[in-house]
Amino acid sequence: MTAPDIGTSVKIKSYKHDGHLHRVWQKTLVLKGNETVVIGANDKTEVLESDGRTWITREPAICYFHAAYWFNIIGMLRDDGIYYYCNISSPFLFEEGSIKYIDYDLDLKVYPDMTYDILDEDEYELHKQKMNYPEALDQILYTQVGQLIKWVQQRKGPFAPGFVDQWYERFLTYLW
């Protein structure tokens, strides 16, 4: 697998299990890029939904993708602290100038005090039936939810103190 070059702008493309495009973040700056980990940043980025609607992100965000895990993590810098939105997803793939992954609906929202909520379990169950997720995939995804919760509890990876702030400071050194 190839990796994006540091300092380049990439799109982030989210797909569903059946292959249809779900959502596209139009512009993310690569701060770290190799075959295993990509860390990117964006602010006030246009997002295109599958139904054609668009919206603009409200705050700066640090995006973390890892090739060995079935999740990605977005740390959003808000006035009252860092909030995390974690997508249970396939490991990322980088091709054609885009970071790509399959979104499996389950999400973990983590608050500045490191409490969290699991979101969209009903949507996951609906899509699991509709798109015939294999039992092995279901097991992988729920195992990864547990792994992600351990990262939160252990303050590992993007949840480590200073991680998001450090990468945001690096983002600010670029002319965006």
Image: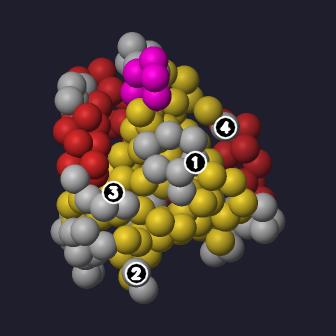
Sequence-first tag of 4 and 2: 2
User: Is label 1 or label 2 in front?
Assistant: 1
Residue 43 position in % (x across, y down): 46, 50
Few, some or many residues within 10 Å of mark 3 (<14, 14–19, 20+) = many
Label of residue 40 in the image? 3
* Residue at screen point 23% across, 42% down: 169
Q: Residues under labels 2 and 3: Cα distance?
A: 13 Å
Mark 4 and mark 2 residues within 8 Å of each other at the beta carbon: no
Between marks 4 and 1 in the image, the one whose residue lies nearer the viewer: 1
Q: Amino acid at mark 1?
A: Thr
Residue displayed at 54% across by 57% down: 45
Q: Residue furthest bottom?
A: 96
Residue designated by label 2: 97
Residue 64 vertical placement versus 115 (above, below): below
How far apart are the two marked residues, 4 and 3, measured between alpha carbons?
25 Å
Q: Which label number is shown at residue 30?
A: none
The answer for how far apart the CA atoms under marks 1 and 2 are is 21 Å
Magenta stretch holds residue 16: no
Residue designated by label 1: 57
Which residue corresponds to mark 4? Answer: 120
- Number of labels in the image equals 4
Res. 99 image quadrant: bottom left
| Boundaries of the magenta span | 78-83
Q: What's the residue type where badge 3 is placed?
A: Gly
Q: Nearer the viewer, mark 4 or mark 2?
A: 2
Q: CA distance from mark 4 to mark 2?
A: 29 Å
Q: Is residue 104 left or right of residue 85?
A: right
Amino acid under disc 2: Gly
Upstream in sequence: badge 4 or badge 1: 1
Q: Is residue 143 visible?
A: no
